[in-house]
Structure formats: C-alpha cells, structure tokens
Amino acid sequence: MPSILNNPNTAVAPDFTREEYQEARTELSNELIDDALAARILANLWSIANNKDKIAWAQQREEEILVAERECQWLEEEVVMQQKSLADEQDVAHREERKKNKLKYAPARDIDVPSDPVIIPLQYTTRKMKAGEYCELHYFTNRGLEEALHSLLTTDAEVLVMRGM
C-alpha cells in the first residue's frame, strides 16, 4: 500500500460546481442526472475516497508509531549494553590498578597513634651495622633495647663528645 503523504483529516472537499470540474460532471450527466446532481455525486465519491484515506492514514500512523517504539526500545537496549560494557571495562581496569598498587589500596587499620617513644638500638650498634661489622644479636632483643632506652637518658662518662667553642 502506498504511503499517504498529506493528512486526509485536514483535506477540504473541492467545489465540484466550478468550471474546472465541468468535464467530470458531463461524464456523469444523462437524462436523469443533471449538473447539480452530478456535482453531488462527485462530492460523495470524494468523501468516500477521503474516508478510506483517513483509515489508511490512521493505520500508517500506527505502523510508524510501532516502528518508532521498536527502534526506541532497540536503542535503549543498545545503550544499556554499552553502559554495562563500559562498567565492566572500568571494573576490570580498577581491579588491575588494585593489583598493581596493592599498598595504595590496602585497608587502613583503625588504631590509635602510639604514645610510647620508639626505642632504637644504641648508636654504637647502628654504626657497626652500617659499617658492615659484626654486631651481637643481644642489642636487638627486648632486654638490649631496654638497656638502650636507659642509656639514652644518661650520659656515659667515658664517651668522647665534641664540644662547641
């Protein structure tokens, strides 16, 4: 069925009594049908054709609406699939980033800031360690670190100290 381009609901019936329709009226005229009756017959035929066009127009509009709804639904599904694909890609990228930078994404422990002073070994042992010399393990045990804590607070008489002038 050919598509109707103009809305037949807004069409206005022509005046079949005008001169331009004289040939059509003559075709319908005989001894029983005069020009006025022929004009009314032409107007009725036009109305019948227009009513058929109105029905076809309504069906055409319904089909166009259905096609548009299907296309809209297809586009919505396509957008949803693209959004899901993008979300999956971002999730994979985020997981890879977490694998590469484990320390950056490590959970922070909810603990208080330590209020105890940090106990470090004696300077004597740290210098020996930096120099690569042998150092007894005793200096790094709890008892050795406790001795280091007490020795930091007191000064040893035999220690050489540079004094400012």
Image (cartoon, rainbow, N blue to C red):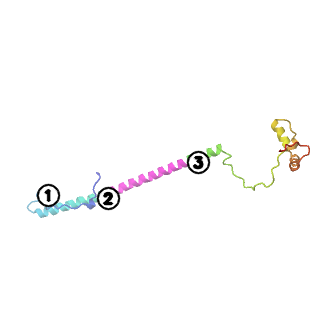
Q: Which mark is residue 58?
A: 2
SS type, badge 1 = helix
Amino acid type, residue under disc 2 in the picture: Ala
The residue wearing badge 3 is 91
Residue at mark 1 to residue at mark 3: CA–CA distance:
75 Å
Mark 2: few/some/many CA within 10 Å (<14, 14-19, 20+): some
The residue wearing badge 1 is 21
Question: Considering only order in the chain, which callout, 2 or 1, is on the residue closer to the N terminus?
Answer: 1
Amino acid type, residue under disc 1 in the picture: Tyr
SS type, badge 2 = helix
Magenta residues span 58-87
- The magenta stretch spans residue 51: no
Q: Magenta segment, principal secondary structure?
A: helix
- In the image, 114 versus 83, the foreground residue is 114
Residue 63 sits above or below residue 128 on the image: below
User: Is the C terminus in the top left, top right, bottom left or bottom right quadrant?
Assistant: top right
> Residue drawn at (87%, 49%), measured in percent from left and top?
146
Q: Is residue 96 left or right of residue 17?
A: right
- In the image, 134 versus 83, the foreground residue is 134
* Dot in front, 1 or 2: 1
